[in-house]
C-alpha cells in the first residue's frame, strides 16, 4: 500500500440471508483516485437504481460502502 495504492483484499465473505457463503476473490491494486472514481460510479448506480434483482442492489450498496471505507482509511492514514 505504498504511494496511495490500495489493495482490494482477496479475503472476505458475502452474507446472503444471514448465512455466510464463501466466494472467489481477486486482488487489485488501485491508486486512491481510482478508488474515488469507482466509489462515485457505484454511488450513482445505487442512486439511479432502475430495478432488477434485490441482490444486485444489495451488492452495489455493499461495494459502494467498501470503497467508502477504503477512502476513509486513506484519509485517516494520511492526516
Image: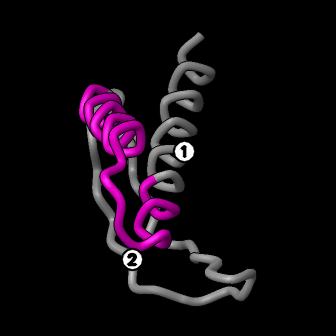
In the rendered image, residue 51, in percent from the top left (x then y), is placed at 35, 59
Per the rendered image, the range of residues in magenta is: 33-60
Residue at the (39%, 77%) spot, across then down: 25
Residue denoted by label 2: 25
Residue, far front: 51
Report the mark closest to the observer, 2 or 1. Answer: 1
Residue 37 appears left or right of 51: left
Residue at the (33%, 31%) spot, across then down: 40
Residue at the (46%, 45%) spot, across then down: 64
Residue at the (33%, 65%) spot, across then down: 27
Picture layout, residue 42 above or below residue 73: below
Picture layout, residue 69 above or below residue 52: above
The quadrant of the image that shows the C terminus is top right
- Crowding around mark 1 (Cα neighbors within 10 Å: few <14, some 14 to 19, many 20+) is some
Depth order, front residue of 15/54: 54
Disc count in the image? 2
In the rendered image, residue 49, in percent from the top left (x then y), is placed at 36, 48
Secondary structure found at label 1: helix
The quadrant of the image that shows the N terminus is top left
Q: Which mark is residue 65?
A: 1
Q: CA–CA distance between discs 2 and 1?
A: 17 Å
Residue 42 in the magenta stretch? The answer is: yes
Question: Looking at the rendering, which quadrant does residue 39 occupy?
Answer: top left
Secondary structure found at label 2: loop
Residue 74 appears left or right of 18: left
Depth order, front residue of 55/32: 55
- Magenta highlight: main SS: helix
Amino acid at each position: 500500500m505504498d504511494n496511495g495504492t490500495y489493495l482490494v483484499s482477496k479475503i472476505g465473505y458475502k452474507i446472503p440471508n444471514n448465512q455466510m457463503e464463501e466466494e472467489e476473490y481477486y486482488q487489485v491494486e488501485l491508486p486512491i483516485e481510482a478508488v474515488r472514481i469507482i466509489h462515485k460510479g457505484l454511488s450513482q448506480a445505487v442512486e439511479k437504481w432502475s430495478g432488477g434483482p434485490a441482490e444486485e442492489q444489495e451488492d452495489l450498496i455493499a461495494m459502494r460502502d467498501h470503497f467508502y471505507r477504503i477512502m476513509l482509511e486513506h484519509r485517516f492514514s494520511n492526516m
